[in-house]
Image: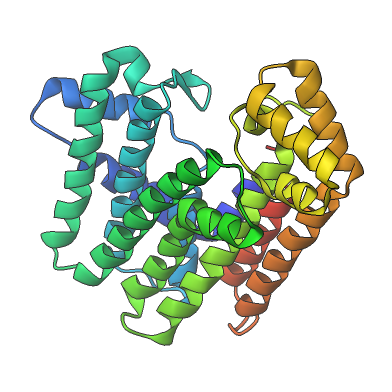
Amino acid sequence: MKIVEQIKQPIAYEMELFEQKFQLSMSSKVALLNRITHYIVNRKGKQMRPMFVFLVAKMVSEGEVSERTYRGASVIELIHTATLVHDDVVDDSNRRRGFFSVNALWKNKIAVLIGDYLLSKGLLLSIDNNDFDLLKIISIAVREMSEGELLQIEKARKLDITEAVYYEIIRQKTATLIAACCSLGAASVKPESQHVDTMRKFGELIGMAFQIKDDLFDYGETQIGKPTGIDIKEQKMTLPLIYTLNNASKKDKRWLINSIKNHNKDTKRVKEVIAFVKASSGLDYAVTKMKAFQKEALRLLQTYPNSDYKNALELMVNYVIDRKK
């Protein structure tokens, strides 16, 4: 059995019901809108976000979920999908998970409007049911994701990112959404309990480990959907590179910065940078940091009694580190 299927097993019923509710939450009287949202729903990925919501909810409540849990999972997915549709417009990207993006098929104007529509549907789903605590969790996540992206853009121009700033960028850009899923799962069944904050922290730690793993793919030999060296070509400062820059001699540092700024389209030069980062223990350092986040996440889980949901979350934490793409 595939690991993702194994993780999904204790919440298989909830996930099936969630898919029906999620489709309903997108519906509109406008035929064009329904056609596009149908296209989006049928190209879903692994559905990690709703899985986090349901597993956490069931773990902290010892097996119970409520209508609020379903709504929370739908709101997260609606708002996350909205940000992805907008991201593809911003990045001028024609593909998403191997399929054409919304902007590739229906152009930018429609894609932006679809993103706005999904965002408003998410907000209304919470407001109509007085789920203001859940809405707050999600709204903070969206704010932080935007700030993280802008902070990265601001810093990428200068290539002077410290490790502390890097952690702040990935915390906001990537970890905050997983943190929102986990705290929302807890809040949906145990509002205003200490579980909400513990699970937010848990999700944040997984998100940090997840992003560092993504950084490491940039230096891998295997093709995983994004070409090796793409982060260097896009002048993205990742942990292996930051560590290498901070520990290089002045001469090597000059060469690295010059390579990234002025020769990032030169395949041979990018390969040389990758080789230099590997030789400077940049990857080993990033792996050590990633495992520290993983260990801390698992430690937080140990405070909960044993259950199938807790086991599935442990599997999820390990999958984030061991995944091949």
Does residue 87 lie above or below 313 as drawn? above
Q: Which quarter of the rendered picture does the C terminus lie within? A: top right
Residue 221 visible to the viewer = no
Does residue 240 lie above or below 27 as drawn? below
Return the x and y of residue 124 as percentages of the image width and height: 14, 53
Residue 93 lies in quadrant: top left
Residue 289 lies in quadrant: bottom right
- Residue at the spot 27% in from the left edge and 48% down from the top edge: 21
Is 229 placed left or right of 187 in the picture? right
Return the x and y of residue 263 as percentages of the image width and height: 69, 21
Q: How is the image coloured?
A: rainbow
- Residue at the spot 20% in from the left edge and 37% down from the top edge: 116
Q: How many marks?
A: 0
Query: Can you name the residue that lies furthest to the left here?
Result: 29
Is 254 placed left or right of 146 in the picture? right
- Residue at the spot 24% in from the left edge and 29% down from the top edge: 112
Q: Nearer the viewer, residue 77 or 265?
A: 265
Return the x and y of residue 99 as percentages of the image width and height: 47, 20
Residue 272 visible to the viewer = yes
Q: Nearer the viewer, residue 255 or 270?
A: 255
Q: Which quarter of the rendered picture does the N terminus lie within? A: top right
Return the x and y of residue 185 as percentages of the image width and height: 40, 67
Q: Nearer the viewer, residue 72 or 62?
A: 72
Is 305 placed left or right of 24 in the picture? right
- Residue at the spot 21% in from the left edge and 22% down from the top edge: 110
Query: Can you name the residue that lies furthest to the front here?
Result: 250
